[in-house]
Amino acid sequence: MLDALGDPTRRAILTALRRGPSSVAALTEHVPVSRPAISQHLKVLGQAGLVDHEARGTRHIYRVDRDGLSSLREWLDQFWGEALDAYAEHVRRTETTRGRRQP
Amino acid sequence: MTLNDTTGLAPLVKTVTVPTTPDRAFYLFTAEMSAWWPLVTHSVGEQDARRIEIGEGVGARLVEYGDDGPLGVWGTVSVWDPPNAVAFSWHPGTDPAQATQVSVTFTAVAEGTEVVLTHTDWYRRPDGVRARTGYVTGWDHVLGRFVAASSSRP
């Protein structure tokens, strides 16, 4: 999933889609690369679960896929929660010891 | 459905309150980072990681070390304001150009110090796949360590 975000153009596309669903043609106004290039980047973002699309007539409308981002967010939430819990445990242990040494 | 900043892409914020002064909380967070950071699961080197050090002052680095020296730079300090705040770029295992930002504040409260960690632009984090692999495989180990630490106390 995250390799998909290693590219600045793909991040720009994702940022543009945050403002709302968009066609490839509309995206070219925000992202300075060709339409075929944008389509290729959208394909990568789609495979990564970050962008979703639906057909409206002959056009495809692309949008940010909340589920893909939610799973990343959940994982990072757990990552930092775990780190901060370990930190709090270290503080409690350290300060209890100090309290005994310095009554 | 559109995504807005109050849901999907808003900064990730985690809060914990610790029973000590902001001075001590800041010191223990930074100078003693290696003593508490769950290295096996939260590192690039995983089993080979030995310690993590954060340098003092703006421009200092966060570095992960193994037995034979540095395994990688995780970020660079952008705010160094003891005992109030520390902030750093965040790019474990990847190019600094792809960094996200982490800031930590320390505020005195009745129970001690409230520590608030904010991870901005987290959705750009390009190292997640690798870190996540380590996270999953090392989970049991860290849980075991917590249990052991808890039960060894009086």
Image (cartoon, rainbow, N blue to C red):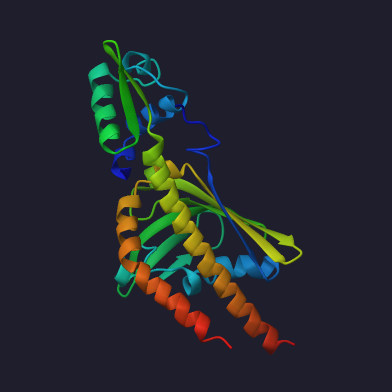
B90 above or below A35? below
Looking at the rendered image, the quarter that the C terminus of chain B falls into is bottom right
Question: In this image, A103 relative to A18: left or right?
Answer: right
**Residue B82 appears anywhere in the view:** no
Q: Nearer the viewer, residue B54 or B135?
A: B135
Name the spot of residue B124 as percent of width and height, x first.
40, 41
A51 above or below B20? above
Quadrant housing residue B39: bottom left
Question: In this image, B21 relative to B74: left or right?
Answer: right
B31 above or below A7? below
**Residue A84 appears anywhere in the view:** yes
Q: Residue at x 51, y 69 (%)?
A: A86
Q: Residue at x 68, y 89 (%)?
A: A101
Name the spot of residue A30 as percent of width and height, x first.
40, 19
Q: Residue at x 39, y 15 (%)?
A: A29
Name the spot of residue B119 as percent of width and height, x first.
51, 48
Question: In this image, B122 relative to B78: left or right?
Answer: left
Question: In this image, A15 relative to A7: left or right?
Answer: right
Q: Residue at x 38, y 47 (%)?
A: B96
Quadrant housing residue A53: top left
Looking at the rendered image, the quarter that the N terminus of chain B falls into is top left
Count of residue discs: 0
Quadrant housing residue A99: bottom right
Q: Nearer the viewer, residue B75 or A46?
A: A46
Q: In this view, which residue lies farthest toward the top?
A: A57
Name the spot of residue A103 as percent of width and height, x first.
75, 87
Q: Nearer the viewer, residue B147 or B38?
A: B147
